[in-house]
Image: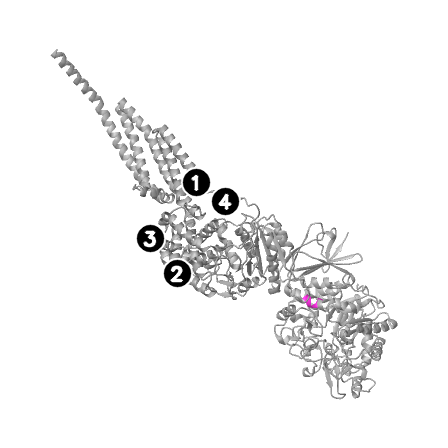
Amino acid sequence: MADESLLSDELLRQLVAVGHVDILVGVPTLNNAPTIVPVVRAAQAGLSRHFPRARTLLFNSDGGSDDRTPALVRDSTPDDVETLTASHPLRTTHRITTPYHGLPGKSSALRMIFAVADLLSADAVVILDPDVTSVTPDWIPALARPVREGAVDFVAPLYPRAATDVPLVTQLVRPLVRAAYGWRLREPLVGEFGCSGRFAAHCLEQPVWANGLVREGVDLWLAGEALAGGFRPGQAALGPRVVAHATPRPGLPDVFQQLMSAAIACLEYHTEYWLARAGADEVPEFGTVAICTETGPVPDLQAMALAFARDVTALHPVLETILSAPTLQGVAQAAATAPDHLVYPDDLWAATVFEFVLAHHRAVMTREHVTQVLLPLYLGRTAAFLLEHAASSAATVDDALESLCLAFERAKPLAAAQWKKA
Amino acid sequence: MAQMVANAVRQAGVNFVDTVAVLLPRILITASIVAVGWIIAMALKWVIRWVLAWLHFNQGCDRIGVGTVLKTADLPPADVIVSLIVFWLVWVGFLLSGVDVLGFTALEGMVRGFALFVPRLLVAIVILVLGVVCANFAWRATLIAAVNARVPSPRVVSGAVRALVLILAGAMALDQIALARTIVLTAFAIAFGAVMLGLAIAFGVGGGGIARRILDHWFPEQPRTEREEFRHL
Amino acid sequence: MKPQGKPSDPHWYKDAVIYQLHVKTFYDSDGDGVGDFRGLTSKLDYLQALGVDCLWLLPTFPSPFRDDGYDIADYYSIHPMYGSMDDFKEFIEAAHARGLKVLTELVLNHTSDKHPWFQEARSSLDNPRRNWYVWSDTDDRYSHARIIFLDTESSNWAWDPISKQYYWHRFFSHQPDLNYDNPDVREEMWRVMKFWLDLGVDGFRVDAVPYLVEREGTTCESVPETHEVIKFLRGQLDAHFSDRMLLAEANQVPELVRPYFGDNDEFHMAFHFPLMTRMFMAIRLEDRKPLVEIIERTPAIPDECQWAIFLRNHDELTLEMVTPEERDFMYDEYARDPVARINLGIRRRLAPLLEGDRRRVELMNGLLMSLPGSPIVYYGDEIGMGDNVYLGDRNGVRTPMQWSGGWNGGFSAADPERLAFAVISNPVYGYQAVNVLAQERTGHSLLNWMRRLIRVRQSTRVFSRGSIALLTPPNHRLLAYVRAFEKEQVLVVNNLSGTVQAVELDLQSLAGAIPVEMFGQSLFPRIGTQPYLLTLAPYAFYWFRLRRL
């Protein structure tokens, strides 16, 4: 049951007027004035174009913006003028913008959205990221329809990716989540997603909203909860994901630290599930992901490779505490091949990651240090991958990433056994 | 004269016997106190070890690096050391009480002096141990941060940090036991100052670029434009 | 009290509750299986007790009945199966004696191909009546005109094998269109009108008005010349009679119907088709949006004019004036079985459309009686009659009136096999379950409820002549409005949903008024400056007369 204290009297009054909804589109915001209007318009257009008969609500949960974001949400109008014969919703459309309580952050916003979805018995909930400027109206049915049709409870996104895109996902989070949770989810960091009202109600009841895991890594936790909670996952093809952050973002070390901590915290949280899981099941796909023909920006790979070699040498005394002897030797050998022929094999990388996860679990040293030490190795692995595949075709890159995931799956049983002993 | 000597000897003997007669009970009591103290200290040592094991004290020490230090120094585990400390503290206390009973003033003075020195020695050892732990922690944290921040020669930097912390801890420990205070203080000031001066010169000569980049990052002159840069996420 | 217009009130139609019936299926007095005027006359007491003010009869002219009488073969007579002209005159007299006005059909646009006029016109190219119809050597003229009867016709032109030319027909091919560019045709149709007006008919429901005149390059609907024809006929009417009425059947969006009122020099009344469709949409969506939109789109009309609003009639529930999405929605919600669909509409009666849900039937009638316009009740809907979608064309909604649970539902003493259309006999809507006699004996029957509803509506002129101000409470399931006329105000609140609803109405502008519920005369708390909380049962509605004392 929803926590009614999350909802002010004024909000409750508005919800009474709305009544039950079929689809709730939630947009969590905090100072997103530069990007929010197209997102709201896309959401509105998506609802009226694809769900003209549905009872819908566009719900904005705001963390106390001081740049007029809530006013922009409230006042934005559709682009096209409605005529009698143009497509328009048959029902009254509702739009609510309200501040949420708690620490500013996506988790507090999502909690409120889930509470509203629960109270209004929403069949499907779609969450959009207010920073994504490439949202189109078609994203709404892509994320909502599989849920409404009863096929799945949770819909993760699928984006067309260039070879160089988001290596933190392709090299680390995706294979780790796939091997651990046993599902072939391509985008476990669900910036936007769809889910059933049942899933939203379930998440609302979990006693995690106050702790750091959800606060720092709610995207990953939601995906993990969907996979581990007995819900039916799916993934839907969306367009490219172009983000324009309204506020300066933290640097890579902080982002990496946060992400790895969240990933390992999820593993701690879902220990019972992933330790018993074997293999990796397919996750149904809805729609076809476009093939990305752009190559995307490529970093200075030579510099990355050189840095990797240097960093491994410098960190050797610390790595000795974390990695097993064979793995450490493999890493050292990989570093020795830099920069000309840098190779960081899939199996070695999988072993590296899992041993770091175990080191974190056992607290062989301060946990923050464990996750920070992994960053240079990740950069080395990324450099090795990009040196080989930056100019490869999409199919080749896909095969390479699949091979990586399989390496993680091979490494999992040993890691699980060691986790149990710790 | 012979009689006088004999009387003196006889009197000395009587005095000696009297003294022994007075001392012997005291020695017996002292021995009893020491023995009982040993038993109590052993019992406490065993209890402390059991309590620390129940509290996972060793694991906690491993987490903060103390365990590693002890292993490196070939010392017993932390709970053993704590229990030993407790044992010795308790038994030394009983020893002192026993010595008091004997009534040897000179001995009392020596023992009192030693008793006053031991706590400071223990504190100095703790300072040293903590210093080693902090030095290792600072070394590791500096090394990782320097590597991730692309600081040149991260090992040198982190080594210097460790050295600084160790020097500080060592000086504090020696000061605690009041050992060559003036020399230690002067030597510490020279060494610490030399290290800091060296770092300042190194940074000033070779680190200007880094400083400029750091300041530019913290205080940009104009808003950073969105340029096509590689994104990991 | 029934403060309707007095018999000589020229604007009586503004306050009228109209009852539409088909003589053929209302009551058979002579046992031949077909209703007749004598039978209708014998049921006038029933109609008077119902509380209606005006009867609108479907065509009773001589006809080959290929379009249920809308294909007229003689404008100056009554078909013998309905009785004689004397029977008709007696009916008129009896109706007027009970204060009931009578409207008949006036099919201006076309005749039957069996009409002597057409028989003469087609006989030769030189015949004087040749130009009474629209002829062409080719079938590609007026190509922008849509086909109305899509299910049966593939063209608006039909080949006449006798005169070897095409003739124009907007409806069935056996209904050739009259040519109103010919002044003789206009004059003749005025003579037709005068004939019936002289017999005492109080007005005409004019069929298929937009299609009177054709012009190349247009859709041939509502062209300016059509309005000239109407103005001519109205001019003649006003010159000879002071209290007669013309009701236009123009299935258009409200802004395109507006011209048919002219400056009160064309029609007195016109049907509001889009409002009807949106009432069905709103109740299914449980959302007032479609109704609010259409009400806001409805243009102002001259004070002397009036909209005619209705729920159902003898035709299919038309879906011409909605978007394709709305049409699909209506089909999916109301006519899942394709056999219920015909042309661009749904051929079902009110009760089956609302799944026999008494609450929804009441709510729809409540809307009908409280929205601006003169309401029209289709015969049989006051008792919740069902339909037969398996009868051809639109005949499924024209089955015999169910008077009792006896022989042929009390409609006729004839053998059941002889009836023009079979009486509905299924266990839900059959005459044994749904009939006037049973409902007259049941306290809270639909019939008695309808009588009460009409009585309450007629107790004030607010509904017939008042303005409408829509309220917009946040709860979209509620449709609320204030009707006002002179010093009277009525607050109407409708719950369009099947669940209990709460609503807080902003009634600050009415502060100080005491709401008195009109059906039970219950007092409600005085309206203040705070939001006024009401709770409504599923599909419930309230009419509050606002008293200031």
Verify whether residue C277 appears in magenta: yes
Please indicate, yes or no, whether residue B84 appears anywhere in the rendered image: yes
Q: Chain of mark 2?
A: A
Magenta span of residues: C275-279
Of the image marks 1 and 4, the number of the one nearer the N terminus: 1
Q: Which residue is mark 4?
A: B214
Disc number for residue A325: 3
Which residue is the extreme one toward the right? C239
Q: Which residue is mark 2?
A: A407
Please name the amino acid that badge 2 sits on: Ala
Viewer-nearest of discs 3 and 1: 1
Viewer-nearest of discs 1 and 4: 1
Q: Mark 1 and mark 4: span between their CA atoms?
A: 17 Å
Q: Which residue is mark 1?
A: B202
Disc number for residue A85: none
Viewer-nearest of discs 4 and 3: 4
| On screen, residue A307 above or below C7 | above
Q: Mark 2 and mark 3: span between their CA atoms?
A: 19 Å
Q: Secondary structure at mark 2?
A: helix
**Quadrant assignment, res A83:** bottom right
| Percent coordinates x, y for residue C408 in the rendering | 68, 79
Total labels: the figure holds: 4
| Percent coordinates x, y for residue C354 in the rendering | 65, 68
Q: Secondary structure at mark 3?
A: helix
* Position of residue C530 in the picture relative to residue A47 (left or right): right
- In the foreground, A116 or C311: A116
Q: Are marks 1 and 2 on the same chain?
A: no
Viewer-nearest of discs 1 and 2: 1
